[in-house]
Image (cartoon, rainbow, N blue to C red):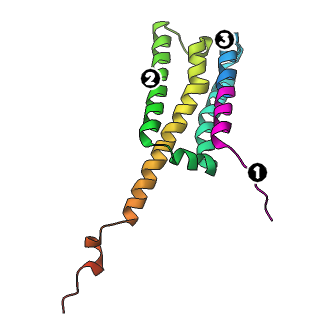
Amino acid sequence: MQSRVPENTVLVLIVTLALWGGAAALAAFEGVFAKQSSATLIAAALFALLYAPATYFLDKRLRAWVASIAAAHLWAAALALDALLGAAALDLAVAQASFAPLARPAGAIAIFFFAPVALALHAALLDRAVRARSLGRLKRPAARSPGARPAAT
């Protein structure tokens, strides 16, 4: 017999995002990212960028909860994060930062928090579109069915 522990997916997600965002912001403002080597920063950024979408695809409860959200709300959140990433990129461009975007807190927070979350949201939207399209193929109109018209005899 399998025992299941009840999980509040929304609360877990909110706490996780708050802790993750807070840790990224604290590390950025304390200059932790600016002190790391380029190889370490690239590895950590790739991990963050892969971890968020992987969590979406591997967690069934999270996927089910995201599927219950209206597509317009997902698009709004994804576009808002895209705008924040654009603002961070503009900030870095105005500051004429070289390949040291993590020396500035805006770049570090964008790379280690906003970008992975935005990528996960875009993965969820893409997953939703692919699932809707595959369901559309399964539900073709009766007019295309061979049994829709009587055979010529």
Q: CA distance from mark 2 to mark 3?
A: 21 Å
Look at the picture and state if 119 lies above or below 7. Answer: above
Q: Quadrant of the C terminus?
A: bottom left
Going by the numbered disc 1, the residue's amino acid type is Val
Residue 6 falls within the magenta-colored stretch = yes
Mark 3 or mark 1, which has the lower sequence index?
1
Mark 2 or mark 1, which has the lower sequence index?
1
Closest to the observer, 122 or 149:
149
> In the rendered structure, which segment of residues is drawn in magenta?
1-19
Q: CA distance from mark 3 to mark 1?
A: 38 Å
Q: Residue furthest top?
A: 95
Q: Quadrant of the N terminus?
A: bottom right
Q: Is residue 100 visible?
A: no
Q: Position of residue 92 (x, y in %)?
A: 50, 12
Task: Evaluate if marks 2 and 3 touch, with contact meaning CB atoms under 8 Å apart.
Answer: no
Residue under the image location 45 percent in, 20 percent down = 86
Q: Which residue lies under the disc numbered 3?
A: 29
Look at the picture and state if 106 lies above or below 81. Answer: above
Q: Position of residue 64 (x, y in %)?
A: 57, 50
Q: Which residue lies under the disc numbered 1?
A: 5
Look at the picture and state if 60 lies above or below 2. Answer: above
Q: Which residue lies under the disc numbered 2?
A: 83
Q: Is residue 34 visible?
A: yes
In this picture, residue 81 sits left or right of residue 153: right
Going by the numbered disc 2, the residue's amino acid type is Ala
- For label 1, the SS is loop
Instruction: Please tell me the numbered disc located at residue 20.
Output: none
Residue under the image location 62 percent in, 39 percent down = 10
Going by the numbered disc 3, the residue's amino acid type is Phe
